[in-house]
Image (cartoon, rainbow, N blue to C red):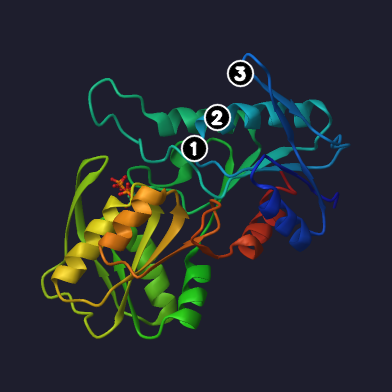
Amino acid sequence: MTPLLLLALPGAEALARQLAGHLHCACEAVELHCYPDGEAGVRLPVEPGGRPVVLVAHLDHPDGKTLPLLFAADAARELGAAGVSLLAPYLPYMRQDDRFRPGEAITSRTFARVLSATFDAVVTVDPHLHRWPSLDAIYTTRTRVVAAAPAIADWLAREVPRPVIVGPDAESEQWVAAVAGRLGAPHVVMTKVRHGDRDVRVTLPEGAAGEDRTPVLLDDIISSGHTVATAARVLRDAGWPSPLCVGVHALVDEAGMALLKEAGVGRVVSCDTVPHATNAIGLAPLLAEAVREVCAAA
Ligand SMILES: O=P(O)(O)OC[C@H]1O[C@H](OP(=O)(O)OP(=O)(O)O)[C@H](O)[C@@H]1O
């Protein structure tokens, strides 16, 4: 089988190097230039020469990163790549999956159409699937979802004695149940109603018990921090111990982190799908396995 060529977009060099170590393949960094008029210039430092190419990108704050990614993908294809795939551990634009107010764009569908037209395969970690049953509902290219639950459960098994896994809303049950199941720990799922970008109400189910364990608040995305902070306050008001918070994708800024601290969250850890000070759970081995299976054949 022809070895892969990994091409890292700016910011994803460290992840690409780790993957290259697991996959025993070449890894290079895409060169990006910003012209005086604000347009992006993209250069591949090597020609693919018939190798399957995997572009590796951290797609938090995606608007400025997406056009360079598309340019790099086209360049790779034009320069002889035997297939062009994308590894984006965090898949953005999954939350606007409906027209919540009249006239709104359903951005997850448009983003999916653009990536599907560009890449032969897309590999990602726990995409935010709420109203879409799976990525295949909107992505027409081949997709592979890597579950972070095994890595999160392994980390918790090492670091947290007697946990109770707590999800802040109904959608979190998929991750919470998977992690709790692997640990043989109990889990609780709260109810959330969102009233605005930074306004959520969370309630604990009647009779939920966990006061004698270490609560682990687990969610897929921590963005403004309001979901987890509100859930932490609800636990505190119910007399639970200070929770640890685990996010798969940490998008949260310093103000959001301060919010979590004020709400009594003891420690915040995340998977390394987005570079962040809280990264503690590495997914490179799981990602390498998925890339090996999906992208080599793309
Ligand atoms: O840190 P925050 O700014 O609170 O954002 C993070 C929350 O947003 C997402 O759910 P969302 O409320 O969008 O729910 P839905 O898409 O499942 O309705 C995600 O699953 C988190 O719970």
Residue 60 versus residue 227 in the image, above or below: above
Q: Are marks 1 and 3 in contact (CB under 8 Å)?
A: no
Horizontal side of residue 287 vs 257, given as left or right: right
Q: Residue at x 46, y 49 (%)?
A: 127
Q: Secondary structure at mark 2?
A: helix
Residue 45 in picture, x, y percent from top left? 83, 35
For marks 1 and 3, the one nearer the N-term is 3
- The answer to whether residue 169 is seen in the rendering is no
- Would you name the residue on which mark 2 appears? 64
Q: Secondary structure at mark 3?
A: loop
For badge 2, the amino acid type reads Gly
Q: Are marks 1 and 2 in contact (CB under 8 Å)?
A: yes
Q: Residue at x 83, y 28 (%)?
A: 79
Horizontal side of residue 93 vs 231, given as left or right: right
Residue 273 in picture, x, y percent from top left? 54, 53
Residue 253 versus residue 42 in the image, above or below: below
Q: Nearer the viewer, mark 2 or mark 3?
A: 3
- Would you name the residue on which mark 3 appears? 38
Work out which residue is located at the far left of the displayed protein and give it. 206
Distance from disc 1 to disc 3, alpha carbons, whole Å, reads 17 Å
Q: Residue at x 70, y 31 (%)?
A: 73
Determine crowd level at label 1: few under 14, some 14-19, many 20+ residues with C-alpha closer than 10 A.
few
- Would you name the residue on which mark 1 appears? 61
